[in-house]
Amino acid sequence: MDDLSAREIEAAVQEALGLFGTSGSVSVQGRQIALHGRGAPVAIDLEQLVEQWPLLPQDLRTRKASDIARRLAQAHRAVGSLAPPASSVAARPARHIVIPIGAVALVIVVVLVAARMLRSRETPAALPPAPETTAGEDAARNARTCEAARKRIYSGASMGPFELAGWVAELWLAMPRGAGAAQAAAAQEPPSAEAVGLSALIAQGKLTAGADAELAAVTDGLVEIVPGFDPEEAGRSPSWRAITARFSGGYARAYFDPALRARFVALADRMADGAGAELGALYARCAHLPYHDAGAWFRGSDPAAAAAALVYSSGLFAELAAVDRGALTALGRTGPIDGLRNAGASLDLAGLGKLVGAHGGGIARGGAGSVVITFPVGGPTRATSASRIVARKLQVGVGQD
């Protein structure tokens, strides 16, 4: 158990208890929190809160603490109402006075408790206002949350329900340049959905119903079309142009939802068709980091192109080097994409399927005879592992099998 998190939870709940008219001291004991005040102590379960606490934003911490304080206060009052009355040893002559007064007091207590319960049902206790944060503070918190999630998934753990802040999903699509364009300047014009043939799927930063009806219903998502190469990458691949569709907010959460992953993969195919892409990759990453994680879909016009898409978009952007850039440069002067395709010319569908299948990947034929490699949502590091094996097969990998 994280002692720092336990102490922070105690302090937050202690402060919130005053809002519910309850006094006493609180202490976290394992997965429970106890309240010691007048009468018998009470305790309630915290479940996974101690582990999740470091990943929660401040406003959610405040709400969680307020909810725990409310439950403790209710439990404390319930235990107090069950306490036996003090025994009476009063003399017989005084009994005629004590009994009527006790009866009146009991009626008053019952009426007050009933009125309080009625008010609590009709008007829930107001939560304290969430503290305001700056954009910089939010970005820093999201970065910490995302990095903590990366550490978990690369240690073999699954992603928890509070770990999706700071992530973006990206769809990278690459197309050959037209005749004579390879000799043009490498700089790219600002891309847009209309310019790349995706206006039927993306409008005003949102997915349309034509893209996917269920994903279009996500209200807090944003999709942006940005260059798929930075200037240095564009200079190394002059015969190619690329765009990236960046999904953030609710779309990024949907990407990690097992119930919606298949829709995202189908959307990637539709967008690749619309843009006329020969290579494509769908993955997620921390918005502030360059590393490509949680790969889901890689597509090429043939097995060699699909292998190139996997190695280029996953292996080249792995935190732990998967591609020997010197060996990649030595493949030829036409650039890394063409070099990888040429290196994989001997790969067939069965051979590529065997390589990626060893790491949980599937392979199938897609639209227009394309080859599609997919990885399940439950294996967020499998694409990176598979890219290492395929890179070695293409003689540009790091290490040995």
Image (tube, rainbow, N blue to C red):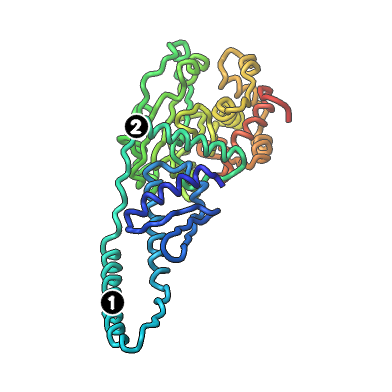
- Which residue is denoted by mark 2 in the rendering? 135
Q: Residue 187, labelled with which disc?
A: none
Q: Secondary structure at mark 1?
A: helix
The residue located at (56%, 22%) in the rendering is: 337
Query: Residue 375 in the image: x percent, y percent?
Result: 57, 41
Disc nearest the viewer among 1 and 2: 1
Q: Amino acid at mark 1?
A: Ala
Q: How many other residues sit within 10 Å of disc 1, few (<14), some (14-19) or many (≥20)?
A: few
In the rendered view, does 63 fall on the left or right side of 5?
A: left
Quarter holding the C terminus is: top right
Q: Residue 127, relative to residue 317: is it above or below?
A: below
Question: In which quadrant of the rendered view does residue 393 lie?
Answer: top right
Q: Residue 299, relative to residue 37: is it above or below?
A: above
Query: Residue 296 in the image: x percent, y percent?
Result: 53, 39
Query: Residue 75 in the image: x percent, y percent?
Result: 41, 64
Give 150 or 240, whichever is nearer the viewer: 150
The residue located at (47%, 41%) in the rendering is: 55
Q: Amino acid at mark 2?
A: Ala
Q: Secondary structure at mark 2?
A: helix
The residue located at (54%, 44%) in the rendering is: 2
* Distance in Å between CA atoms under marks 1 and 2: 56 Å
- Which residue is denoted by mark 1 in the rendering? 105
How many numbered marks appear? 2
Q: Along the polypeptide, which appears first: circle 1 or circle 2?
A: 1
